[in-house]
Amino acid sequence: MTILLEVDNLKKHFPVYEGIIFRRQAGSVKAVDGISLRLASGEILGLVGESGCGKSTLARAIMQLVPLTDGAVVLEGRDLSKIGSAALRAERVNFQMIFQDPYASLNPRMTVYDILAESVRTRHKIRGKRLASKVASLMERVGLPAHQMRRYPHEFSGGQRQRIAIARALAPEPKLLIADEPVSALDVSIQSQILNLILNLCRDLGLTMIFISHDISVVKYISDRIGVMYLGRLVELGPATEVVDKPLHPYTKALVSAVPLPDPNLERSRRRIILEGDPPSPLNPPSGCAFHPRCAFATDACKLSPPVLEEKIPARFAACIRIGEI
């Protein structure tokens, strides 16, 4: 097994200032607070959690779109946070991102040909007919007719725009792809088409991918492993089917119980887990386990120190001191 990506104790804290004339830092929002993970070449890792848990910030930190507060992002042995800007630009061909909103992520003043050609040229120094042929091939690969390459993004539907965004991410022939909720802005009827397209492309091209979503059933469908995030930290990590079918962490159990079942008899008979209260503020997180104010199984020991994400059973990691008791 070849490790493509290593994330080591990654932290991203945003400072919060007060005062108008004499500004001083009053605290910091701990959007991502010490996440470590490893991705094997060709693996799809799904990240799931509530809105505001730090999924998108983690993605942008891995992509080096925001500076890290601490930690390291190592791609094929190179620490991306330690190389210079010129070296980082050269390295970007190896990792690309599909953003959530296809309406905002494409330049409205550029044709689809120009958008894709710009990305192709970052890897291949080609022009003319060879460049046009490469762009046409990319469009056909994502299910769009090549004769539409001279159109502008506003002339396409939301699903077609996301296909263009996928083609743009594939154009430099990356090794790592990060998809940040790529179907949440689309109609339900289109979501399955885009999911199947992304999954088939990853399999055909051997891509490694981090797939981010708030829908754990979608993440189960597309991922090899699932990481569950809560308030900037990983609370569970393991094989996708096992995490969903037999969750270990109380928070994961609550997420799974919120997914509706297609069988009405099973839906009526199962016990839903309703979390009380709102997620804590990352500006002032609770002591100990961040989930303890909403956890039905919390004890006084849960308030003392943050639990470590550790292997509880083979290939299953969880950050909870009460695993095995609940």
Image (spheres, rainbow, N blue to C red):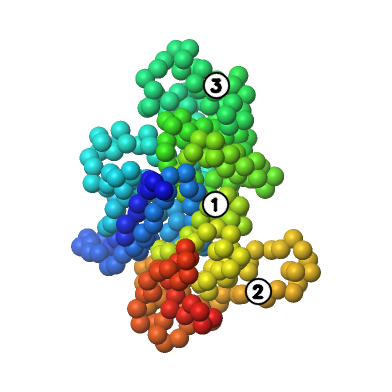
- Name the spot of residue 150 as percent of width and height, x first: 55, 20
Callout 2, which amino acid? Arg
Category of crowding for the residue at label 3, using alpha-carbon neighbours closer than 10 angstroms: few (below 14), some (14–19), many (at least 20) = many
**Is 105 displayed left or right of 186 in the figure?**
left
- Name the spot of residue 188 as percent of width and height, x first: 67, 48
When asked about the image quadrant of residue 29, the answer is bottom left
Q: Earlier in the sequence, mark 2 or mark 3?
A: 3
For the view shown, which residue lies furthest in the right direction?
Answer: 265
Query: Which quadrant: the C terminus?
Result: bottom right
Q: CA distance from mark 1 to mark 3?
A: 29 Å
> Which residue bears the numbered disc 2?
272
Assess whether mark 3 and mark 2 are in contact (beta carbons under 8 angstroms): no
> Which residue bears the numbered disc 1?
223
**Is 257 displayed left or right of 224 in the figure?**
right
167 or 162: nearer the eye?
A: 167
Category of crowding for the residue at label 1, using alpha-carbon neighbours closer than 10 angstroms: few (below 14), some (14–19), many (at least 20) = many
Observer able to see residue 270: yes
Residue at point 52% right, 59% down?
239
Q: CA distance from mark 1 to mark 2?
A: 25 Å
- Name the spot of residue 87 as percent of width and height, x first: 26, 36
> Which residue bears the numbered disc 3?
136
Assess whether mark 2 and mark 1 are in contact (beta carbons under 8 angstroms): no
Q: Earlier in the sequence, mark 1 or mark 2?
A: 1
Residue at point 45% right, 86% down?
299
Element type at mark 3: helix
